[in-house]
Image (spheres, grey):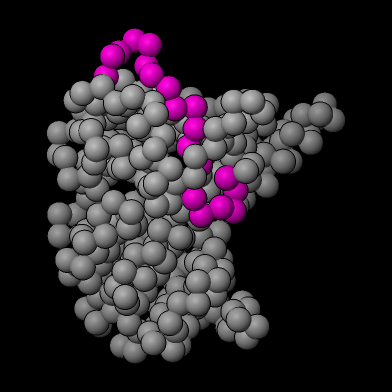
Amino acid sequence: AYSVAVMGATGAVGTELLELLEERDFPLRELTLLASSRSAGKELVFKGRSIKVKAISDEDFADIDLVLASAGGSVSKEWAPKAATAGAVVVDNSSAFRMDPSVPLVVPEVNPEAALEHQGIIANPNCTTILMAVALWPLHQYQPIERIVVATYQSASGAGARAMEEVKQQAQAILQGEEPPTEAFPYPLAFNLFPHNSPLNDQGYCQEEMKMVNETRKIFGVSDLRVSATCVRVPVLRAHSEAINVEFKQPLDVAKALELLQAAPGVKVVEDWQANYFPMPVEASGQNDVLVGRVRCDLSHESGLELWLSGDQIRKGAALNAVQIAELLVS
Ligand code: HSE
């Protein structure tokens, strides 16, 4: 059994990590909970036992086998190398090391073998990228993908727990004819959407969009895969959705695509034409699987398919993917 530290234990992903370690009965010998000095001292319950959260700076990592880090990029940049030098393996949920050539970027359904080539740090990909990779990989293995054009519909919780609360407060204020609060978000998100979710680069793409481009290429091992993304923030509370247009080398018919998706790990096909029911974020919330549906031929391209997905970005898009990576290391 392993001595595990959860770094960023009091945050939304940290809380989910603890739930998953418990739910999946991860082989634990010792569990250390770490957070910023602001959150240190809090007590969290794991398997009925109360554990006091320590400040990250108090930990020397000498007795830790595995660190699940979800404390943000600057914390990871500082502490992940220290933990790795002390002999721990760090599964890092931030973007700090994802594009580092010496750090594997792993989605267990896609490239599990890469996890074993680590030099102390393994990166967990961006949430929208993980969800898309899980859905497209089974298709790509059967018929190579040449181009992906994706639009995301990202929930407020992707911007943090505080942002999620603010959307509710905004909705309430607007309905009461009051000025909506805008502390977590720059503008009201309630009854609205943002066409991008961070500042744009010179080419007009935001960070999240470039993560989808670069991380998908690295995970799929296709350095020149053509990917373009539009990442939109919508007033959904939890779970991200994506409308994906895929161009294959050769045509892939819908029946075959559905068969591949139905057999794929981590995917649940949700297509009920009679009930007019397809994947929705409210259904995806709290689920491990990525829900995929609306699989159809692209009317504009003979080798094209369109599909829709909804997936819990805090579960499979973050915490579950990290725990699955950890499971690969101990299996
Ligand atoms: N970058 C993501 C977002 C976070 O902003 O939605 C993943 O939940």
Q: Position of residue 112 (x, y in %)?
A: 26, 60
Residue appearing at x 44%, y 89% in the figure: 29
182 and 92: which is toward the camera: 92
Q: Quadrant of the N terminus?
A: bottom left
> Which residues fall within the magenta stretch?
284-303
Residue appearing at x 39%, y 46% in the figure: 263
Q: Is residue 263 above or below residue 4?
A: above
Residue appearing at x 44%, y 27% in the figure: 295
131 and 303: which is toward the camera: 303
Residue appearing at x 17%, y 66% in the figure: 117
Q: Is residue 240 above or below residue 76?
A: above
Q: Position of residue 21 (x, y in %)?
A: 50, 73
In the picture, measured across the screen, residue 81 lies left or right of residue 73, that is: left
Note whether residue 210 is visible.
yes
In the image, is residue 288 part of the stretch drawn in magenta? yes
Q: Position of residue 101 (x, y in %)?
A: 15, 54
In the image, is residue 204 part of the stretch drawn in magenta? no
Residue at the far top in the pictured view: 300
Q: Quadrant of the C terminus?
A: bottom left
Location of residue 170 (image quadrant): top right
Residue at the far right in the pictured view: 176
Location of residue 231 (image quadrant): top left
Marks counted in the figure total 0
Note whether residue 203 is visible.
no
Q: Position of residue 269 (x, y in %)?
A: 49, 39
Location of residue 323 (image quadrant): bottom left
In the picture, measured across the screen, residue 267 lies left or right of residue 117, that is: right
